[in-house]
């Protein structure tokens, strides 16, 4: 891959050895159940109406549109903490800015793809990132391969965690968001829509982070700390979310990260000029309360929680090769955050 075109998503290396096993993911919506772990619950008063919603087969933006229409407000008055998968059953909180008038009872809203389970007033709008994490229950069907190899990788993931890659959803179909971001930063295209601009910047930033993490794994550095690493609160190494400002790493860690930045200089320079600031992200995602069972010989059921910003696909990729039905490929809206 060069610094001129980014037209496909690379296959970044895993930390676990390949099990050689495969399975089908999201054959049914109920095979992928996500429950948001909220940062806080509504306090009972305030200008914002918070809604606890279960959606089935709908993406988050679509639900926000339906809520805005039902409440008679603009879509910008609807908030949520994170995007959730479309082909799944997910439970998450939304907020609606309703400072005046009677509070509508949206638990009576009738829609085939969503249910309002509860509502309450709160003093602030829900914004992106306002969540602790997500709880997953995943059923993998048509599992083929060596169960012993699968079990070994499951144990390794539960014990050591997984590479905290940004998921493929972040990069768009065939990695197109990264190429659009490159073209935008190079001023080959002009992006007027603020939402699209944010998506492209996020894709570029996430791509560079994944490249740093992938290089460490290729060099045999998974689970190891380098001289000059910046550690997270759990004492694990972090990687760069590129932007302006002084690089926080030193010594070996800084040399590795600068090497990746030089290889993707146009992207990194563009992010600095776009006004992004240097941040850090843990290189390790640790599933919490992870368990699994085999309901049938060819079915594997997993349960675990992840902190906000980490991807369930990063867990699955360490265990086996999970493939979704073709209908999902082009219209996955975004990652679970």
Image: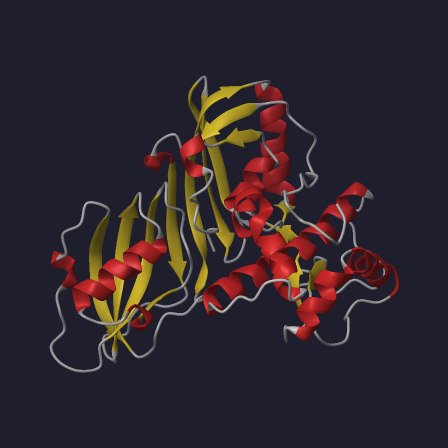
Q: Which residue is drawn at 39% across and 30% down?
A: 27
Answer whether residue 231 is visible to the viewer in this image: no
Q: Which residue is drawn at 35% across and 55% down?
A: 60
Residue 186 image point, x, y percent: 68, 64
Residue found at the far front of this picture = 188
Q: Quadrant of the N terminus?
A: top right
Residue 194 image point, x, y percent: 48, 69
Indicate how the structure is coloured in the image: secondary structure
Q: Residue at x 45, y 17 (%)?
A: 297
Residue 28 vertical placement versus 48 (above, below): above
Q: Quadrant of residue 8?
A: top right
Residue 317 image point, x, y percent: 59, 36
Residue 141 image point, x, y percent: 43, 25
State the residue in front, 73 or 214: 73
Answer whether residue 274 is visible to the viewer in this image: yes
Q: Residue at x 69, y 66 (%)?
A: 242
Residue 89 vertical placement versus 232 (above, below): above
Residue 160 vertical placement versus 154 (above, below): below
State the residue in front, 60 or 217: 60
Q: In this view, does 67 lie to the left or right of 166?
A: left
């Amino acid at each position: 891959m060069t610094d001129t075109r980014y037209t496909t998503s690379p296959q970044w290396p895993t930390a676990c050895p390949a099990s050689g096993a495969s399975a089908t993911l999201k054959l049914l919506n109920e095979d992928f159940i996500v429950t948001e772990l909220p940062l806080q619950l509504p306090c009972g008063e305030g200008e914002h109406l918070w809604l606890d919603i279960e959606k089935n087969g709908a993406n988050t933006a679509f639900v926000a549109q339906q809520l805005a229409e039902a409440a008679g407000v603009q879509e910008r008055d609807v908030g949520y903490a994170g995007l959730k998968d479309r082909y799944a059953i997910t439970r998450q909180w939304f907020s609606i800015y309703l400072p005046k008038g009677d509070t509508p009872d949206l638990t009576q809203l009738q829609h085939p793809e969503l249910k309002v389970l509860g509502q309450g007033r709160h003093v602030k709008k829900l914004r992106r990132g306002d969540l602790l994490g997500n709880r997953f229950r995943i059923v993998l069907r048509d599992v083929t391969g060596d169960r012993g190899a699968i079990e070994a990788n499951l144990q390794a993931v539960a014990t050591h965690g997984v590479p905290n890659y940004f998921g493929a959803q972040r990069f768009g179909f065939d990695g197109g968001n990264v190429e659009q971001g490159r073209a935008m930063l190079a001023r080959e295209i002009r992006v007027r829509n603020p939402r699209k601009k944010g998506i492209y910047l996020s894709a570029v930033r996430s791509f560079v982070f994944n490249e740093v993490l992938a290089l460490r794994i290729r060099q045999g550095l998974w689970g190891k700390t380098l001289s000059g690493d910046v550690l997270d609160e759990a004492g694990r190494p972090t990687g760069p979310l590129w932007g302006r400002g002084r690089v926080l790493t030193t010594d070996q860690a800084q040399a590795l990260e600068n090497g990746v930045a030089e290889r993707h200089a146009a992207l990194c320079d563009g992010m600095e000029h776009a006004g992004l600031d240097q941040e850090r992200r843990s290189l390790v995602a640790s599933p919490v309360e992870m368990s699994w069972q085999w309901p049938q010989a060819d079915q594997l059921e997993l349960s675990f929680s992840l902190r906000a910003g980490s991807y369930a696909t990063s867990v699955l990729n360490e265990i086996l090769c999970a493939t979704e039905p073709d209908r999902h490929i082009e219209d996955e809206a975004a990652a679970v955050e």
